[in-house]
Amino acid sequence: MTKTDPTIRIAMIHALEESVGPARAAFSRLWPQAFAYDLLDTSLAIDRAHAGRLDDDMMERFRVLAEYAARHPGKGGRTAGILFTCSAFGPAIDAVKARMPIPVLRPNEAAFRRALEAGDRLGLVVSFEPSRASLERELQEMAAAQDRKVTVVPIVADGALDALKAGDGARHDELVAAAVSRLRGVDAVVLGQFSLARAGGLCAQASGLPVITTPESAVEALKAAVEGGSRGI
């Protein structure tokens, strides 16, 4: 077993506690040498859903969390990179990226790059409805930056997040797979939240489509950025 290297410290910043497990699993499998630690503020998701938009207070809270992660060294060294796992806060994360001298990743950008390599008609699945519009916009913007026109087919797996919060992981996975199976004529499917990754295998089995999950894509991209000395992907 490869031992964790405490000099490679990666901060994971979460707004949903359901994102912690999938993120940790991806690091354990794909980058076990890194010491990945968690900063969790579950009030962010609640406040975002209640406000219906990303306000100045939330933007400031993201800045504070990122600066805390970047400026406070632990035993072995400073944080080498930051991975946000909260998909409904893209503009706040972009503001952090502009300020930080270390690699900072939005939760979906690496997965979206993979999706764009798969085709021009893409399914996008969420279980946290406030994420839907922002993620669809982010994917369209990434396509436009490549001079591409894509069709994004978004779908909400209603009830899946509630099931997961209630401790019924099997019901969560069934609801997500059922949502994916309703997609037609797409080249690939992106599970747009870290919490959805656990259903990836069942979704692929149910739909016969390529299914892209965010934790694995993000960890691989962040590893390449940190080890390559880049600020981004």
Image (cartoon, rainbow, N blue to C red):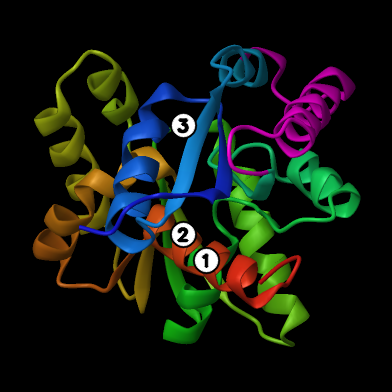
Gap between marks 1 and 3, in whole Å?
27 Å
Boundaries of the magenta span: 50-77
Vertical placement of residue 206 versus 90, above or below = below
Do residues under tags 1 and 2 come within 8 Å of each other at their CB atoms? yes
Is residue 74 something that shows in the picture? yes
- Spot occupied by residue 184 in the image (x, y as percentages of width and height): 29, 68
- Residue visible at 73% across and 67% down in the picture: 141
- Spot occupied by residue 91 in the image (x, y as percentages of width and height): 79, 44
Q: Which residue is mark 1?
A: 223
Instruction: Point out the image quarter for the C terminus.
Output: bottom right
Horizontally, residue 141 falls left or right of residue 96, namely left
Q: Which residue is mark 2?
A: 219
- Residue visible at 65% across and 82% down in the picture: 149
For disc 1, the neighbor class at 10 Å (few under 14, some 14 to 19, many from 20) is: many
Horizontally, residue 225 falls left or right of residue 157, namely right
Q: Secondary structure at mark 1?
A: helix
Vertical placement of residue 191 versus 233, above or below = above
Q: Amino acid at mark 3?
A: Phe
